[in-house]
Image (tube, rainbow, N blue to C red):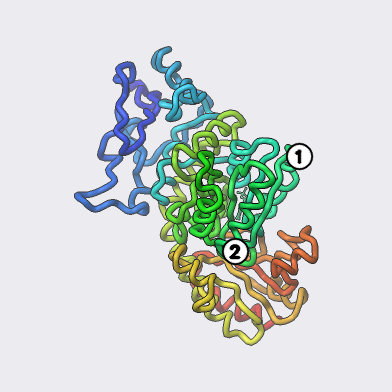
Amino acid sequence: MPCRRLLAARPRLRPGKGVTMTDDSNARPKRTMRHQARSIGNRKLKPATMMMGHGYDPRLSEGALKPPIFLTSTFVFESAADGKRFFEGVTGVRPGGAEGLVYGRFNGPDQEILEDRLALWEDAEEALTFSSGMSAIATTFLALVRPGDVIVHSAPLYAATETLIGRILGKLGVTWLDFPAGATQPEIEAVIDAAKAKGRIAAIYLESPANPTNALVDVEAVHAARAAVLGGSDDLPPIVIDNTFLGPLWAQPLAQGADVTIYSLTKYVGGHSDLVAGACIGATSVLTPIRMMRNTIGTITDPHTAWMLLRSLETLELRMSRAGENAAKVCAFLRDHAKIERVGYLGFLEEGSRQADIYARHCSGAGSTFSVIVKGGEAEAFRLLDNLRLVKLAVSLGGTESLASHPAAMTHLSVAPARKLELGITDNLVRVSIGVEDAGDLIADFDQALAAV
Ligand SMILES: *Cc1c(COP(=O)(O)O)cnc(C)c1O
């Protein structure tokens, strides 16, 4: 049997948007409603359910239950007119993006299915996937900035993001102004106002919770501050937020007024510490320039990694839920331990505090990444790290396995001492990311390791 259906590129139909195929595409099998159904009766299906089939029609791939990995660099057009139309979409001559599969630097079936599924978690119009979290961030900035622009951002940021803004975009004549993660609306307004006086504001860039302080950013206050200071402008800077630590399960900042959420899919979404990837999620109008930049510079994720992420998404809710439950149990144990000074965990915010208020408005769970402040200094923290047996000594987070590291000596080693103090990155701080192991086993591991401290 000829592999016509395998050759037939997956028609690019946006689910639920009523896109109709033009005549010269009629020969191709169409995606059926069965695989796009987003509801049963008036019940809207949950993302966890949609991860098993959304955006993929087995009839286009020999009936394979699971999407194949499409290892191809280019796609065959059925007619020259098709090719022309697809290129009009890819190059932005016509808005709305590519209508068909064109070339591996622009799109591919695995990446498109992945993007369709990712968007569901935040109820967004569109998602774009990238070769890493940093390439998602860099592509976004490259799409948004012009020389002389100012970036307003929350602080602290992921170290590589700070380097990108300060040193790399700085070379292109872009400057920045920041406000601390927990800032109030008037404080944020003052910074936006000062930035406005310096130049065009290219973006308001947030990261919440901040690493390693876990301070939450009030996205609603940022949205209101932007409206208050720049309200009349028809060129409002987008609010972009790195949602790696709590998204997409425990925080969905698009609902609080963010325009784009950014992910390192390397962390919870990939979830098995076996791939590097990133994503941007938001409205098509905001993502279009970012997509055009990705098309130009080629920061799209590869088909194999996209396929791995499709597999990861099927268990995303299970993994994150279990990790979150485990973290709550481990933190409850650590908080009462004689050798622990404090546990910096979002589940332990002081009642009535501003942070607790932001948490109540923005988050549905405390995550599974937190800080443990050991009584003593570097020696005590190192002894804890060196004696853990199940919990591995490695940077990163969000995997099935629990990890622990020492920010002051590792991820934040190059941060100036005064800045470290300001951020609360002390020598007795251990960063922990809890996985999906048995919670009792993890507690036993911390118990025996702390006995050796
Ligand atoms: C890991 C991480 C990044 C960078 O992602 P990569 O996939 O390593 O490029 C960005 N932001 C946060 C918050 C991260 O944890």
Q: Secondary structure at mark 1?
A: helix
Q: Amino acid at mark 1?
A: Lys
What residue appears at the point 25 percent right and 40 percent down from the top-left corner?
34
Does residue 68 appear in this view?
yes
Q: Quadrant of residue 95?
A: top left
What residue appears at the point 53 percent right and 26 percent down from the top-left corner?
73
Q: Residue furthest top?
A: 80
Q: Using the image, determine if residue 119 lies above or below residue 432.
A: above
Residue 399 placement (x, y as % from top left): 55, 58
How packed mark 2 is, by other alpha carbons closer than 10 Å (few <14, some 14-19, many 20 or more), is many
Residue 142 placement (x, y as % from top left): 63, 37
Frontmost residue, 165 versus 74: 165
Q: Quadrant of residue 296?
A: top right
Q: In the drawing, what numbered circle is on residue 26?
A: none
Residue 122 placement (x, y as % from top left): 42, 51
Frontmost residue, 226 versus 365: 226
Question: In the image, is 46 to the left or to the right of 396?
Answer: left
Task: Check disc 2 and report the residue beneath it.
Answer: 183
Numbered circles on residues, count: 2
What residue appears at the point 59 percent right and 45 percent down from the top-left corner?
203
Q: Residue furthest left?
A: 41
Which quadrant would the C terminus be assigned to in this image? bottom right
Q: Amino acid at mark 2?
A: Ala
Which quadrant would the N terminus be assigned to in this image? top left
Q: CA distance from mark 1 to mark 2?
A: 28 Å
How packed mark 1 is, by other alpha carbons closer than 10 Å (few <14, some 14-19, many 20 or more), is few
Q: Are marks 1 and 2 in contact (CB under 8 Å)?
A: no
Q: Using the image, determine if residue 30 lies above or below residue 358.
A: above
Q: Secondary structure at mark 2?
A: loop
Residue 151 placement (x, y as % from top left): 64, 47
Nearer mark to the viewer, of 1 and 2:
2
Task: Check disc 1 and report the residue beneath it.
Answer: 171
